[in-house]
Amino acid sequence: MRRFPSLLVYGLIVVMAGCGGSAAKGPATAAAPRPAPVAKGERFPDTQYIVAEGFSSISYSEAETVARNEVSARVQSELSSVVTSIAGSTTAGGQTSDYQRLLSQTTSKTSFAHAEMIQTDPASRRLSNGVYQVRAVLSRSEASAAISHDYDLAAIDFRAAATELQRPSTDLTAWTATLRRAEAGFSKMSAAAFSWRAITRREHESFAADLALYEQAEQQRAAKLSAVKLGLVVADGAGDKGRLAASLGSALARLGLTATPGDCAPGSYVLRLTPNLTWEQGPFGPVCRLSMPGELVACDGNRSVVRVAIDSKEFLGTHSRGKDQALAALIERVDEARLVPVLKRELAGCLPVAER
Amino acid sequence: MSARSRILVMVVAMIAAIMPCRIAVAGSKVAPEPVSTESLASSGAAKVDAAAPWLAGWTLEDQVWNLRKAFADTSTDRVALVFFATWCAPCKQGVMQLTARAADLKAGGVSVVLVDYQEDAAKVRGFLGDKPAFPVVLDRFGASEQSYLRTNGDQVRLPRTVLIGRDMKVQAIFGSEGGDYVDRLLSGR
């Protein structure tokens, strides 16, 4: 009887080992025994092509898909390393430049946009021991030509907008709209330039000049923004008004705007907000939510620039002890970090704000 | 002597009794402080032994400041938030005491932050001079009002000093400042 448990353990080990073995025989292509790769020979030198083999125990079609995906993955890997090396580098002062800031925002989703150019090589098809094998190839020169075309298209918009930015303008809202066009164009151009670099291993010939143009636009943006005088008026209605206004003020500072308390002064703007609280009974106590509708007004001419809605799902507070504590919890949540994206969303269309 | 004349004589006598004191106070640059510093259990939402309320403001160089930044210097054991305004006459006496013993405070690990209540930089510079001995924070929007200075609908009370430890808990709150003000800050009680 004493031997029974140890026999049981041995038995279990044997059964589990058996299960592990059978799993390897499944239909997964990765587990299929791979035949020796087809010799690439001189046909696809690495300097001119990106090449990958695909294997499948099911069909040539699946092997093709695997091979294409593998080429895409290699391009993506090279692209990621290009982006990482640029985004990771800092200027001499250890500060992140505006270009790098834009880069981190836009290139996190950069991907190779010409997967349709990856072709399979019919001559590479092989069936060996029940395993289908196909080679996929991307011509570096063909891909770079397509990417260069993308770059040139984006550059038309960007260069037109960047040139327009240099003309004298007193209409900050119109100037901001042009700036956003330039940024969008530059973002597309950057994506194309990085893909080009990943494919060709060289810098795109126009990129240095376009980058200089973009940096010039960024300097203009910073200068325009620093000249903006912004008054901030927060109406009563949501508990600690001083704290709420201070949080708004520090969030605006993160966007490059210096806000001071008070209403219109000549040559300035004023952001007028009216906090609204709504209450409901939650499972653990009262829940209060905050929204702050308002408007940005250009004081010269008392002209409404934009209506804003400073609200977020995160602007809520609840407390089991009662309304006062729930309100205090709410005000604590309406902090600089939560306000920055909301203010940016609401103001970026009419003021040249950028997150610092 | 008529009743009116008697009243007039009494008023003159009272003024004569008070005047020397006034002159003595005005004549001495740092008047002796006979009273000790007022100790408080709470002020605004700040309570001794409780977590210090949030506070943010702007430096005279227009940089955003918050309470966490005050502890950035590792040699700082405690931060004394000294709330003042240019209209608060006693506040100036307090700042003068602090300035006179700035070295002692530094050696004692106490970082003083002068927090101005809702005034602009030019006014504050006029009050403190161009080179204040301590960092100055402008509470432009009155963030300190409910957190530190106003209790239950009462008026804003100044001066107020709130001593905060590295654990971000309030160690002591002081109201009007006596001759022992700096020593109390150094002792933390």
Image (spheres, rainbow, N blue to C red):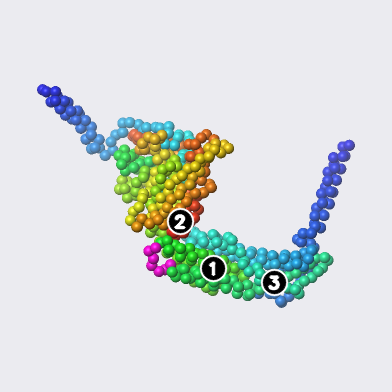
Secondary structure beneath disc 3? strand
Q: Amino acid at mark 3?
A: Gln
Chain under callout 2: A
Q: Which residues are magenta?
A: A165-171
Secondary structure beneath label 1: helix
Any part of residue A62 in sight: yes
Q: Residue at x 59, y 65 (%)?
A: A82
Name the N-terminal-most of marks 2 and 1.
1
Residue at 36%, 36% in the rendered image: B155
From this view, report whether residue A329 is shown above or below residue B13: below
Res A259 seen here? no
* Callout 2 touching callout 1 (CB < 8 Å): no
Q: Residue at x 76, y 61 (%)?
A: A29
Q: Which residue is mark 2?
A: A347
Residue furthest out toward the bottom: A42
Chain-order first, disc 2 or disc 3? 3
Q: Real-space Cα distance between discs 2 and 1?
A: 25 Å
C-alpha span from label 2 to label 3? 46 Å
Q: Is residue A38 left or right of residue A83?
A: right
Q: Which SS does the magenta portion mostly show?
A: loop
Q: Measured from the top left, where is residue A315 in percent x and y?
A: 51, 46
Residue A215 in magenta stretch: no
* Residue occupied by mark 1: A189
